[in-house]
Image (cartoon, grey):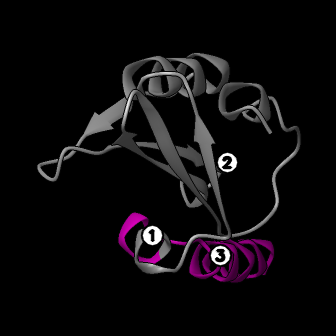
């Protein structure tokens, strides 16, 4: 009986996880502009959150912050913008901490 209850809780938890494509298809919650290059911003976000930055075919970089279940909590898309960068911030659901704000000048 305990295993059945645990399986139901796990399935419910996983169904609430957001996929990468789902989060990236949503409109950004906020957009930041910074004088730092896209490489600098991506490195900062990736370094502070111990996650890799991904290069995309459209010239942007994406950094995903995932929860303990593997669902995307936060997504950052970094675009070249003149001498600096435009950072689109998307949030699927809240996470603890906001060290990412140092990377985008928020």
Give the mark nearest the N terminus, 1 or 3: 3
Question: Residue 38 sits in which quadrant?
Answer: top left
Residue shown at the point (69%, 83%) measured from the top left: 8
Report the mark closest to the observer, 2 or 1.
Answer: 1
Q: Is residue 6 above or below residue 12?
A: above
Residue shown at the point (67%, 48%) measured from the top left: 68
- Cα distance, mark 2 to mark 1? 13 Å
Q: Nearer the viewer, residue 66 or 89?
A: 89
Answer whether labels 2 and 1 touch (C-beta < 8 Å): no
Quadrant into which the N terminus falls: bottom right
Question: Residue 18 sits in which quadrant?
Answer: bottom right
Is 10 included in the stretch rendered in magenta? yes
Q: Percent x, y for residue 47?
A: 57, 16
Tell me the residue that label 3 is attached to: 7
Q: Percent x, y for residue 12?
A: 68, 83
Answer whether labels 2 and 3 touch (C-beta < 8 Å): no
Q: Is residue 20 above or below residue 105?
A: below
Tell me the residue that label 1 is attached to: 19
* Label 1, residues with CA under 10 Å away: few <14, some 14-19, many ≥20: some
Q: Is residue 14 above or below residue 100?
A: below
Identify the secondary structure beneath mark 3. helix
Majority secondary structure of the magenta segment? helix
Report the mark closest to the observer, 1 or 3.
Answer: 1
Is 93 included in the stretch rendered in magenta? no
- Cα distance, mark 2 to mark 3? 17 Å
Give the mark nearest the N terminus, 2 or 3: 3
Answer whether labels 1 and 3 touch (C-beta < 8 Å): no
Residue shown at the point (64%, 27%) measured from the top left: 49
Tell me the residue that label 2 is attached to: 68
Identify the secondary structure beneath mark 2. loop
The stretch of residues the image draws in magenta is 1-22
Q: Percent x, y for residue 104?
A: 67, 34
């Amino acid at each position: 009986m305990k295993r059945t209850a645990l399986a139901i809780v796990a399935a419910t938890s996983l169904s609430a996880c957001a996929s990468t494509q789902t989060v990236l298809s949503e409109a950004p919650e906020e957009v930041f502009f910074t004088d730092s290059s896209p490489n600098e911003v991506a490195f900062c976000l990736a370094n502070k959150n111990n996650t890799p930055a991904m290069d995309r075919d459209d010239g942007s970089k994406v950094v995903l912050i995932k929860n303990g279940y593997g669902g995307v909590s936060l997504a950052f898309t970094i675009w070249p913008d003149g001498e600096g960068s435009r950072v689109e911030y998307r949030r699927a659901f809240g996470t603890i901490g906001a060290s990412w704000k140092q990377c985008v000048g928020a």
